[in-house]
């Protein structure tokens, strides 16, 4: 059966409140789901599952994980009952093994908010099977690029690869800088540096992102930036970036989302 080759996405997922609030990101997620060919399944790389070894979720009926605190009760009542896809998890594990990357399958892992918040808008009927892939924050950008490269064949099998993280993610600055005013200078500098290099010709420069202006303040820990490299690896050497949304949440969190598709 012929399937449409899917893109690789990078989504800044923002606050869990995007699950229920109208926002540019939520509208962009909905539009993408409505306007692009429906995937056979989603492979979701979430910054909120961080492991030492690459892990894939293998549950047939993954639970909705509410991995946050201090939000309105409405959020905790949300369930996103998408089916899992153990066969896809095993297929991904084999692809990683063929690339020399050890990986495991967790038969109990559910969907954390880095996954279900955007998915709730992308596919509101929760009828597209989902497998999560963890990040390994101790292993760096090159490891995640290799993960994406190994998993790229899934795009030809109708699988949409979504990397859910953040363009910048310093929660301390987010809370202390407040909501009003211009984005912090280092946030703008780091974001601009990244966007300038999101081309086939310059993407490899991103592998040494820690040396970018403001990088270590933009990401005091790397787990929200590493999903980008899975998307880049899956996109291959020739891609076109299509911006889906941009902007800022408060003064410290850059909210960028884009699709990497074939030229």
Image: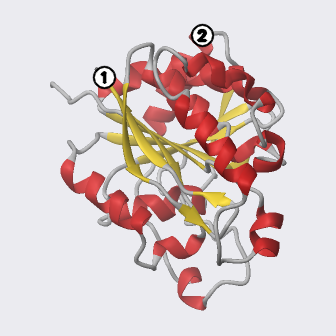
Q: At 48% across and 39% down in the image, what residue appears?
A: 86
Height in image: 240 above or below 177? above
Which image quarter: residue 67? bottom right
Crowd class of label 2 (few under 14; some 14 to 19; many from 20; radius 10 Å): some
Rendering coords of residue 198 (x, y %): 51, 29
Q: Earlier in the sequence, mark 1 or mark 2?
A: 2
Depth check: 56 or 35 in front? 35
Q: Which mark is residue 262?
A: 1
Position in image of residue 197 (x %, y %): 55, 27
Q: Position of residue 191 (x, y in %)?
A: 62, 44
Question: What crowding class fits label 1: few (fewer than 14 Cα within 10 Å), some (14-19), or many (20 or more)?
Answer: some
The total number of labels drawn is 2
For the N terminus, which image quadrant?
A: top left
Applied colour scheme? secondary structure
Q: Is residue 233 left or right of residue 65?
A: left
Q: Secondary structure at mark 2?
A: loop
User: Which mark is on residue 99?
Assistant: 2
The answer to whether residue 12 is seen in the rendering is yes
**Residue 236's mark?**
none
Residue furthest toward the bottom?
73
- Relative to 8, residue 166 above or below: below
Looking at the picture, does residue 188 appear above or below residue 181?
A: above
């Amino acid at each position: 059966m012929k399937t449409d080759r899917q893109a690789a996405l990078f989504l800044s997922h923002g606050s869990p409140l995007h699950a229920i609030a109208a926002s540019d990101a939520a509208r962009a997620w909905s539009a993408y789901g409505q306007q692009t060919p429906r995937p056979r399944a989603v492979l979701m790389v979430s910054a909120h599952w961080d492991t030492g070894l690459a892990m894939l979720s293998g549950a047939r009926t993954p639970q909705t994980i509410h991995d946050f605190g201090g939000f309105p009760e409405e959020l905790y009542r949300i369930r996103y009952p998408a089916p899992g896809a153990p066969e896809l998890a095993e297929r991904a594990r084999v692809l990683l093994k063929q690339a020399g990357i050890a990986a495991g399958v967790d038969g109990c892992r559910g969907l954390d908010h880095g996954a279900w918040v955007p998915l709730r808008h992308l596919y509101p009927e929760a009828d597209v099977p989902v497998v999560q892939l963890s990040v390994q924050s101790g292993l760096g950008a090159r490891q995640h690029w290799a993960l994406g490269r190994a998993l790229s064949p899934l795009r030809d099998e109708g699988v949409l690869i979504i990397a859910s993280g953040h363009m910048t993610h310093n929660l301390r600055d987010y809370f202390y800088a407040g909501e009003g005013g211009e984005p912090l200078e280092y946030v703008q500098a780091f974001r601009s540096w990244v966007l300038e290099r999101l081309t086939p010709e310059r993407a490899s420069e991103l592998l040494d992102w820690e040396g970018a202006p403001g990088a270590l303040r933009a990401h005091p820990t790397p787990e929200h930036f590493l999903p980008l490299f899975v998307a880049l690896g899956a996109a291959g050497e020739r891609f076109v970036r299509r911006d889906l949304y941009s902007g800022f949440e408060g003064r410290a969190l850059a909210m960028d989302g884009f699709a990497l598709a074939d030229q």
